[in-house]
Amino acid sequence: MTPSDRAAAATMTTAEAQEAQELSDIFEVETPTPYEIMKLRARSHPGFLIGTSVVLVVFLVAVFANYIAPFDPYDQDISRRLINPIWGIGGSWENPLGTDAFGRDYISRVIHGARVSMIVGIVAPLIAACVGTIIGMIGGYFGGRIDAVAMYLINSKLALPGLVVALSLVAVFGGSVTVLVLVLAFLFWDRYAIVLRTVTQQIRSQDFVTAAEAVGCSLPRIIFSEILPNVMNQIIVILTLEMAIAILIEATLSFLGLGIQPPTPTWGNLIAEGRNFMFFKPYLVTIPGICLFFLAIAINMMGDGIRDITAPEGRN
């Protein structure tokens, strides 16, 4: 082969290589990151989208209740008591959901009632999550006597009847929002501790934790940087479930007269105030009851969606 033939062959080989590289770049598929995968799952999960939308709407209503409500929820006008909603006889758009036994605008009271439900439903599980996560992770990581102490605390809490304890504590210390939040946080922390203890024991033996210990990482670094991100999924799922339970317990205690006291508008108080008129004015009971029902369902749908999005391989 002459030098010119070898040069032509080399040029052809280079051109073919460039063409092959261009084709490879065209058909190369970039591997999506875990965050992008979760975004795709979230967009295609109807339960998560519906539940999150409802919870977000209720949260915004609670935050901006003072601006959304057409009237002050405490203003009374006996001359306008028990006016029907717009679909009833004598109803008007001035009071779309009618008025209660004291002439207070009902839609304003329902809107402000969402604020109490969201405060209790968010703050109480968050406090419980902090306490239960610390106890469960410490017990699961160290084992031995420390784990025995953690299990003693968990078993002692599990032996207590939850609702009876809540009724007793609220009856003794009063039914303010602060007392109710602290009581519910005391009732819920054990569920986080049980789950986090078991999961931490499993993660404790993983190679990345062993490697962090081998290079001399501090204990807070190992717990908060290596273990906590891997158990965050379980914490979020439990948190969403406890939100619904906290809201329902708050409504139950308020209905029984041991929760937040009237005239503060809560959905439980509205049901309790309207039960004497439920056969003549059923909207006084059904409207806050429907709000509680849909909020609890939406929170559970959101929690189930988070579970499917973050760890679909572990679902049943």
Image (tube, helix red, strand yellow):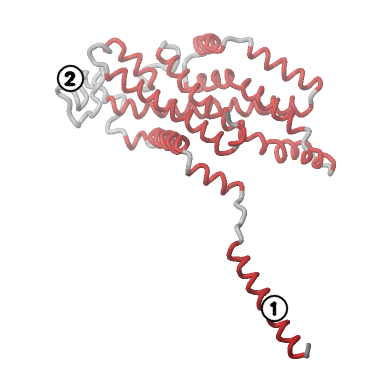
Q: Residue at x 34, y 19 (%)?
A: 270
Query: Mark 1 sits on what residue?
Result: 14
Q: Which residue is mark 2?
A: 79
Q: Quadrant of residue 145?
A: top right
Residue 189, position in %: x, y? 61, 22
Residue 193 image position (x, y, % from top left): 66, 23
Task: Say few, some or many: other residues with alpha carbon within 10 Å of mark 1 (under 14 / 14 to 19 / 20 or more).
Answer: few
Q: Depth check: 222 or 172 in front?
A: 222
Seen in the picture, residue 89 relative to 49 is either above or below; the reply is above
Q: Residue furthest front?
A: 1
Q: Position of residue 283 (x, y in %)?
A: 27, 20
Q: In the picture provided, is 272 more to the left or to the right than 154?
A: left
Q: Amino acid at mark 2?
A: Ser
Q: Is residue 216 left or right of residue 99?
A: right
Classify the position of the N terminus by image quarter. bottom right
The C terminus sits in image quarter: top right
Element type where label 2 sits in the image:
helix
Q: Earlier in the sequence, mark 2 or mark 1?
A: 1
Name the amino acid type tagged 1: Thr
Residue at x 62%, y 32% (from the top left corner): 314
The residue drawn where x is 22% and y is 28% is 95
Q: Is residue 3 above or below residue 52?
A: below
Distance CA(mark 2)–CA(mark 1): 93 Å
